[in-house]
Image: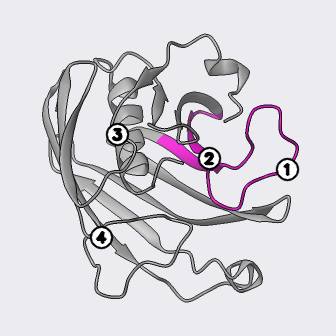
Amino acid sequence: MAQPASVAGVAEESFGKPAWGRQGEFTLSGQRVRYERGAERLSLFEPLAADVRVPLRFSWASPAGDSATTCEGWTPEQSANGRLAAAKPWVLSCRWGSAPAAMLQIGEGQMRRGKLSREGAYRRGELTVGLRSVHLMEGSPTPHTAAVGYEMLHQGTVVGTVDLSGGVPRLRRPDPATPLGRAVTEAALALALASEPS
């Protein structure tokens, strides 16, 4: 995926595996992540199966201690954008209970270059990180319908990305021992696990 200048110099970390499946575990910088998904395949750009109310659960052995989340999914009434794109966007909503509690929500975004994006936010206490899908590959002028990755923004600047365009996800993030790094990591894990690497 095309990387913004604000994270171009940040080291990239690969994690996960080429196909998530229903459950599994992997390490991210030596820290264990365990997950369960409500379906064999998930994508914010494909309809959510009607029988899947909890598409995702995962835990991360973070520098700040264990972090666990449960994510719910639902399909809201379609907007004009959703009808135009025939995308049937669904909403992913995740909650972390560790103090202070955090939540992430992402769903339908804007029509950009004829493609319907997914946008949302992660909030923990006073910290808010914006989330938006990326549809352009490096060097390509033609956007993809599904996301090739996601950007995480803090105060209008991209501070982290998760690239889903390779065989496994690749993450660029601030130091995960900081509150901002923890937020970017938790959001990136949720977005990657709710997608299929291409």
Closer to the camera: disc 2 or disc 3?
A: 3
Query: What amino acid is found at the position of numbered circle 3 in the picture?
Result: Lys
As for residue 37 lying within the magenta part, the answer is no
Q: CA distance from mark 1 to mark 2?
A: 12 Å
Residue corresponding to mark 4: 39
Looking at the image, residue 122 sits to the left or right of residue 20; the answer is right
Q: CA distance from mark 2 to mark 3?
A: 16 Å
Is the residue under label 3 in contact with that under label 1 (CB below 8 Å)? no
Q: Secondary structure at mark 3?
A: loop
Q: CA distance from mark 1 to mark 3?
A: 27 Å
Residue corresponding to mark 1: 142
Q: Secondary structure at mark 2?
A: loop
Q: Earlier in the sequence, mark 2 or mark 3?
A: 3
Q: Quadrant of residue 140?
A: top right
Residue at x 85% of width, y 50% of height: 142
In this view, 185 is above or below 19: above
